[in-house]
Image (spheres, rainbow, N blue to C red):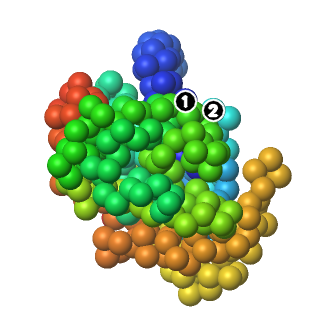
Amino acid sequence: MTTYIKRLMKGITAVLVLLVLAACGQSTQNDADQAADSPADDQTTESVAEGELQDVELTLDWYPNANHVPIYTALKHGYFEEAGLNVTLKMPAEADDPIRLVGANQTDIAVSYPGVLMKARAEDIPVKAFGSLVQRRLDAIMYKEESGIQSPKYLEGKKIGYASDSISEEIIYSMVEEDGGDASKVEMIDVGYDLMPALSTDNVDALISAYMNHEYLLLEDEGYNMGHFEFQDYGIPENQELIFIASDQTIDERSDVLTKFMTALQKGYETAVENPDEAIETLFENEENEYALDKDIEIRSWKEFLIEYMSADGEFGTIDPAQYEEYAKWIYERGAIDSELTGEDLTAPAL
């Protein structure tokens, strides 16, 4: 599910260029609008009539899957409407759509990843995280038990499949070093979107950039005895997996909307936890034909991983600026980004 991050990371530079151009065009338009608008117009745009729903467009990170269960549950049960919001979903046409559209104020909210956010913010793209969807990492280093790999240092002389992400490379190297191995003896193989086939056909010995609640379960389902290492067990700072991002402008001007959005999502999560089978049925009612889901895998994903991982920090939806700052410091020190970032640079908690 995360294999498309390769395109996303490569698109960050292009996104920055587009955002600069968009900002120039917006500045010109704003000058014209300012001259044309009257005080009465300003009053209209600054207030919402009593009982009127506020429109919110949410761009997903990928096709509908178990990670999105709270969203679809909240939609089905009308929790967004109860909060005064008319939420519509947008599927990304390209991998970099979430960060690009939010940064250009062409969508209100998007689902994204902390690493992507940090790379974008280091390039001065005006986006921040305001809430979490999955609070604990879903990706890990995974391998077949038959490979003889027992800890990260055993990755010496091995081929590691990944999706061309510099942060993933640094995670591998750091974990091998932490375990007493020689990171220079690890061979990183860019397998693009073919993570599972690369491991199942033994073109690589292990994977990073794959999800425990997706690729790992699918590989087990194919009959492989799988093993894995979690990043935090070998010195990598903890961080969240899936987050909600908005532009600085949206955060400044519509913070009340973001709080209402997260409050409604909390209800969606709680309802899905109380009624997991119904929640999965709701997900499948929204399945994309182009990306057919395996029902057994999605059920396991929700029940074995996501119920716990979405509230791992104690309460669904929350983010900790200090945690983001610690992880950003780590990836900066490893050379994966060029700028030091603070928790305030990266987050604006709505809850």
What amino acid type is highlighted by mark number 1?
A: Arg
Q: Is residue 315 visible?
A: yes
10 Å crowding of disc 1: few (<14), some (14-19), many (20+) = some
Q: Position of residue 339 (x, y in %)?
A: 21, 27
Q: Secondary structure at mark 2?
A: loop
Q: Residue at x 31, y 58 (%)?
A: 151
Q: Nearer the viewer, mark 1 or mark 2?
A: 1
Up/down of 74 relative to 167, above or below: below
Up/down of 319 relative to 122, above or below: below
Q: Which mark is residue 330?
A: none
- Left or right: 244 in relation to 79: left
Q: Position of residue 2 (x, y in %)?
A: 54, 46
- Left or right: 75 in relation to 316: right
Q: Are marks 1 and 2 in contact (CB under 8 Å)?
A: yes
Sequence-earlier tag: 1 or 2: 1
Q: Which mark is residue 7?
A: 1
Instruction: Kindly indicate the quadrant of the structure image that contains residue 273.
Output: bottom right
